[in-house]
């Protein structure tokens, strides 16, 4: 997170690309001069008062998602085409002010959980370059983890938006299927694919996912507007949350130290007041096996099978042998097998829902091991299969999921995952917030309010809006002669009034960075709210208000901008 101007942030991104020297992360990268011109345009829009919640943040996009002006390859040069328009998710990302700098490497045709199945090279882990990055959204996750970009888009069918998040120590958000339209996405399994978000901070990732959600009128599988609203506002946590964890036998076979690390994560969540219950998740794991071992793999052939068939001579060069074998194997599945598997899935889903009744979510390790690149060469199929034990069932059973960092084992990231029914995305975020680092609440009353020119700084720091608030009637407000314009809030012994504002929540680390960059005459102090709470908030040095017009009578900054500043 940073508080650089968009232009400064872009320069730092390209400097970081040169510094880390990870060319395998990218399939295509925009010229720096072109991106700087776009950044300058963002600055002009901000100066004109436009609301851009992701203003100047740097983004990367997995190369099975269309970005106008850059080719889409899905990890295969022979498949390349030049899209005429942005994918819906990219269009919305850019509309919010984010700047896309390039397309990232992936397991070819989004088929794999390892990040090594690409003719553009195996993507190495951000922490340990001898080990895999995880996939299939490999380049997107590593670009975020290395600090090149602030956020990135991936896709998830079997865990591709969660496994690489865990192995690189970042957030991976897999929303309810269809919340983010898949228009402009090369399908892996069209009925199961989800667009996902990577970020280093939960607040930024969640805000981005929310901005991308909503039916676009183009994707026939996108959720309706009412369903999107339900996901954003409903399914809050129980008063005393209950979280399921797998019984002991389903934690066998994990990497050394991981079982103990998961136990620590369980204890950490329990310490926040969450009740932990053990559940036999066998029905979920049986459902997971159907994704590749059953007839559902036929949908992968429907997506790209003809291309591979027509280019068999490229298998081993441009076409990855493991991917080709999986996709071509789907051609032999019959409709009878598919309907039998669907019936089996329905039964397993019903059993799983019964077992999880009364719980708010399921907590598991995100994956089971972190192999070296050499280990994957020795066993590319079996090694990949081990990655998806806890992820493969989610999209088959229409569940939402969220991967979060949970420390390190032997110096490499270890991650856990929260999974819940469809439209429980908000509950997952609330649980993740309990699990994550401490947060700080902050009252804002001026240029950092929603829709105001500095609001993007709160978003970049991982902030999330809690509620509108009003101060106690103990404050005066002044219009300061700053750029951009902002008010000064001063506490007084008498003659004050209640001032309208907003209450935001920021990660402690983001809050610290935010405060360190705060310019004079602004300061952070205790602000008393109308309900008696005292929380950190923006205050102003009294000296700076001399000669500035007092606008207390308007009741707040927005009211002043609307009615007073034009007078």
Image: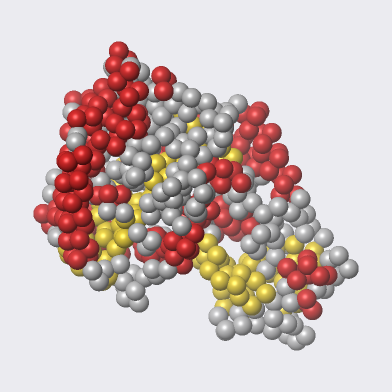
In the image, residue 381 above or below residue 516: above
- The single residue placed furthest to the front in the displayed view is 336
What coloring was used for the rendering?
Answer: secondary structure
- The single residue placed furthest to the top in the displayed view is 313
Residue 421 in percent (x, y) is at 31, 60
Q: Is residue 202 left or right of residue 376?
A: right
The residue at 56%/55% (across/down) is 459
In the image, residue 53 above or below residue 268: above
The residue at 35%/18% (across/down) is 318
- The single residue placed furthest to the left in the displayed view is 249
The residue at 71%/49% (across/down) is 46
Residue 351 in percent (x, y) is at 17, 61
Q: Is residue 316 left or right of residue 430?
A: left
Residue 133 in percent (x, y) is at 34, 35
The residue at 53%/62% (across/down) is 464
Front one among 244 and 92: 92
Asked if one can make out residue 498 in the rendered structure from this viewpoint, the answer is yes
Asked if one can make out residue 202 in the rendered structure from this viewpoint, the answer is no
Residue 536 in percent (x, y) is at 58, 70
Front one among 519 and 219: 219
Report how many numbered discs are placed on residues in the image: 0
Quarter holding residue 436:
bottom left
Front one among 456 and 541: 456
Quarter holding residue 124:
top left
């Amino acid at each position: 997170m940073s508080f650089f101007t968009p232009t400064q942030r872009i320069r730092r991104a390209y400097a970081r690309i040169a510094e880390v020297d990870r060319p395998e992360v990218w399939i295509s990268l925009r010229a720096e001069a072109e991106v700087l011109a776009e950044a300058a345009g963002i600055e002009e829009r901000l100066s004109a008062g436009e609301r851009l919640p992701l203003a100047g943040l740097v983004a990367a996009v997995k190369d099975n998602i269309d970005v106008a002006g850059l080719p889409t390859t899905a990890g295969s040069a022979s498949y390349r085409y030049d899209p005429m328009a942005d994918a819906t998710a990219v269009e919305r990302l850019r509309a919010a002010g984010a700047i896309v700098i390039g397309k990232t490497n992936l397991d070819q045709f989004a088929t794999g959980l390892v990040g090594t199945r690409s003719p553009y090279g195996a993507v190495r882990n951000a922490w340990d370059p001898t080990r895999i990055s995880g996939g299939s959204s490999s380049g997107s996750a590593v670009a975020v983890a290395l600090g090149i970009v602030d956020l990135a888009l991936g896709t998830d069918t079997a865990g591709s938006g969660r496994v690489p998040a865990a192995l690189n120590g970042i957030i991976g958000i897999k929303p309810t299927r269809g919340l983010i339209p898949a228009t402009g996405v090369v399908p892996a399994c069209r009925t199961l694919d989800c667009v996902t978000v990577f970020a280093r901070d939960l607040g930024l990732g969640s805000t981005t996912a929310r901005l991308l959600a909503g039916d676009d009128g183009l994707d026939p599988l996108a959720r309706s507007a009412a369903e999107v609203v339900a996901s954003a506002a409903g399914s809050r946590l129980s008063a005393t949350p209950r979280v399921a964890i797998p019984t002991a036998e389903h934690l066998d076979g994990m990497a050394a130290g991981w079982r103990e690390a998961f136990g620590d994560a369980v204890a950490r969540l329990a310490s926040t007041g969450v009740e932990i219950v053990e559940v036999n998740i066998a029905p979920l794991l049986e459902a997971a096996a159907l994704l590749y071992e059953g007839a559902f793999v036929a949908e992968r052939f429907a997506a790209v099978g003809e291309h591979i068939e027509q280019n068999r001579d490229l298998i081993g060069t441009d076409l990855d042998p493991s991917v080709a074998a999986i996709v071509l194997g789907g051609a032999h599945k019959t409709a009878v097998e598919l309907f039998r598997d669907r019936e089996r899935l329905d039964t397993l889903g019903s059993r799983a829902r019964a077992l999880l009744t009364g719980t708010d979510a399921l907590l598991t390790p995100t994956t089971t091991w972190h192999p070296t690149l050499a280990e994957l060469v020795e066993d590319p199929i079996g090694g990949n299969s081990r990655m998806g034990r806890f992820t493969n069932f989610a999209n088959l059973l229409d569940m939402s999921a969220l991967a979060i960092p949970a420390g390190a084992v032997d110096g490499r990231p270890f991650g856990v995952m929260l999974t819940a029914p469809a439209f429980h995305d908000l509950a997952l975020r609330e649980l993740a917030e309990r699990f994550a680092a401490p947060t700080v609440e902050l009252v804002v009353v001026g240029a950092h309010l929603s829709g105001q020119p500095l609001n993007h700084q709160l978003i970049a720091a991982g902030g999330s809006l809690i509620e509108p608030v009003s101060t106690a009637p103990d404050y005066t407000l002044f219009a300061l002669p700053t750029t951009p314009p902002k008010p000064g809030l001063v506490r007084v012994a008498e003659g004050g009034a209640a001032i309208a504002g907003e209450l935001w929540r920021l990660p402690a680390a983001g809050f610290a960075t935010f405060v360190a960059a705060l310019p004079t005459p602004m300061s952070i102090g205790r602000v008393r709210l109308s309900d008696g709470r005292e929380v950190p908030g923006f205050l102003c040095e009294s000296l700076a208000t001399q000669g500035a017009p007092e606008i207390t009578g308007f009741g707040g900054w927005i009211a002043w901008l609307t009615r007073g500043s034009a007078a």
